[in-house]
Image (spheres, rainbow, N blue to C red):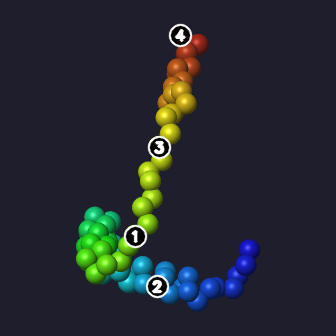
Amino acid sequence: MNTVEDPIVAEVRANREAIFASCDYDHTKFTAHMREVSEQLKREGWVFADRPIVRTKPQGSFILREEPPTSTES
């Protein structure tokens, strides 16, 4: 693995950490903050790429159920 740290990646991670810390590490606050920032940027004329949500239909059941072993003790 490459151990050289990209300065741009380091800056993005540091900014993300600072924003998350300002939201008290609360995902709900963080999401609300990011939505507010996005809406402000849209009002300023920034254009965001739409990413379609791709959901696939599950292929069969994902639940594995095993019966407990039967006891041979009397």
For residue 27, say whether it is visible: yes
Q: Position of residue 16 (x, y in %)?
A: 42, 79
Q: Nearer the viewer, residue 54 or 2?
A: 54
Cα–Cα gap, marks 2 and 1: 23 Å
At label 3, the amino acid type is Arg
Counting residues from the N terminus, which is met first, the one under dot 3 or under dot 2?
A: 2
Q: Nearer the viewer, mark 1 or mark 3?
A: 1
Q: Residues within 10 Å of mark 2 (few under 14, many from 20)?
A: few
Cα–Cα gap, marks 2 and 4: 63 Å
Give the residue at mark 4: 74
Asked if the residues shown at circle 1 and circle 4 are in contact, with their CB atoms under 8 angstroms apart, the answer is no
Counting residues from the N terminus, which is met first, the one under dot 4 or under dot 3?
A: 3
Asked if the residues shown at circle 2 and circle 4 are in contact, with their CB atoms under 8 angstroms apart, the answer is no
Asked if the residues shown at circle 1 and circle 3 are in contact, with their CB atoms under 8 angstroms apart, the answer is no
Q: Is residue 55 above or below residue 48?
A: above
Give the residue at mark 1: 48
At label 1, the amino acid type is Phe
Cα–Cα gap, marks 3 and 2: 32 Å
Disc 3 element: loop
At label 4, the amino acid type is Ser
Q: Position of residue 19 (x, y in %)?
A: 35, 80
Q: Which mark is residue 14?
A: 2
Q: Nearer the viewer, mark 1 or mark 4?
A: 1
Disc 2 element: helix
Counting residues from the N terminus, which is met first, the one under dot 1 or under dot 3?
A: 1
Q: Position of residue 21 (x, y in %)?
A: 34, 80
Q: Nearer the viewer, mark 4 or mark 3?
A: 3
At label 2, the amino acid type is Ala
For the N terminus, which image quadrant?
bottom right
Give the residue at mark 3: 55
Q: Quadrant of residue 69?
A: top right
Residue at image position (29%, 69%) is 35
